[in-house]
Image (tube, helix red, strand yellow):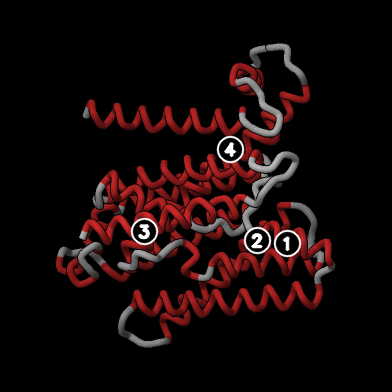
Amino acid sequence: MTARLILVFAACAALLLAVLAGVAIGETPIAPAVVLQVLANKLWGAGYVLDPIDEGIVWNYRLTRALVAAACGAGLATCGVVLQSLLRNPLADPYLLGISAGASTGAVLVAVLGLGAGAVSLSAGAFAGAICAFALVILLARVSGPTGTSAQIILAGIAGSQLFNAITAFMITKSASSEQARGIMFWLLGNLSGVRWPSVWMAVPAAVLGLVICVWHRRALDAFTFGADSAASLGIPVRRVQLLLISCAALVTAVMVSIVGSIGFVGLVIPHAVRLLAGTGHGRLLPASALGGALFLIAADVLSRTLIKGQVIPVGVVTALVGAPVFALILIGRRHAR
């Protein structure tokens, strides 16, 4: 128990330090002491005299970015672990189900038709599109036949992704102005610039609730490692657990995509990397992957703001530039290990 408490404490400390670094590091560096003073003023009314500009940057801009980045990274990594276990496919990730493509279509529809302005309306459209895409994928998987549930879901996800990507491209080409198209494409590549406190209140509870549900079913996920038949022989209600956990992964991904857009490789790379360190037991793998995803996306957000002076790179570009080589190294390492 003592060792477990030490690990929990170390994980919390690492996450807090990463959030602090995400707030302090930027185009305009802010001392960690100033960050802590701002937090003390806002949370406990400490009364420190600070520059209003620094206070606004910390509280209204960087802290919300760091918290949403941590929540999105944790949620996407958790979903990646669950999907790879349930579908028994090492290439499964949260966007396999077509949710990202559906969210993109919903956001583009809102932007092009002018149904609202600002992050809230865009997020609402993205969330609705994600849910529609997930419903379509499940419907395709159900009507395609009784055999190979995992294969059906994978193929249905590919088909749904291609369909919604085509719809998105068609709407941008036909109806969007050049300014709208530029903003939409930036959002589609992953954008944390527009997140504020309402986004934090969406992302953090979704990530925590998704992790809790998945950890609660950790023994069932361990059983699924050996296949659905083995899980059924151990008394696991296969259909109910599959539906619950895939739905959980889909909803968490929908929330994250509706806030920050499409951010790839987090749900694909982080579970593979963490398995090399924590093993395959989901009691350790799930929380470790959530922590790894949070740290990875915070670091990617910092890089997106500092790599090019005066410009912000879409965070999805950074995750791809880092994630693709890392995933290739993992694959090569596994091949040599065999």
* Secondary structure found at label 1: helix
User: Which numbered disc flags the more N-terminal residue, 2 or 3?
Assistant: 3
- Are the two marked residues, 1 and 2, in contact with CB atoms closer than 8 angstroms? yes
Is residue 278 visible to us here? yes
CA separation, marks 3 and 4? 24 Å
Name the kind of residue labelled 3 in the image.
Answer: Val
Name the kind of residue labelled 1 in the image.
Answer: Ile
In the figure, 271 relative to 84: above or below? above
Name the kind of residue labelled 4 in the image.
Answer: Ala
* Secondary structure found at label 2: helix
- Are the two marked residues, 3 and 4, in contact with CB atoms closer than 8 angstroms? no
Give the numbered dot on residue 82. 3
- Are the two marked residues, 4 and 1, in contact with CB atoms closer than 8 angstroms? no
User: Which numbered disc flags the more N-terminal residue, 1 or 3?
Assistant: 3
Name the kind of residue labelled 2 in the image.
Answer: Leu
> Residue 105 in the image: x percent, y percent?
66, 70
Camera-side residue: 173 or 199? 173
Q: Which residue is mark 4?
A: 66
Is residue 259 visible to us here? no
Q: Which residue is mark 2?
A: 188
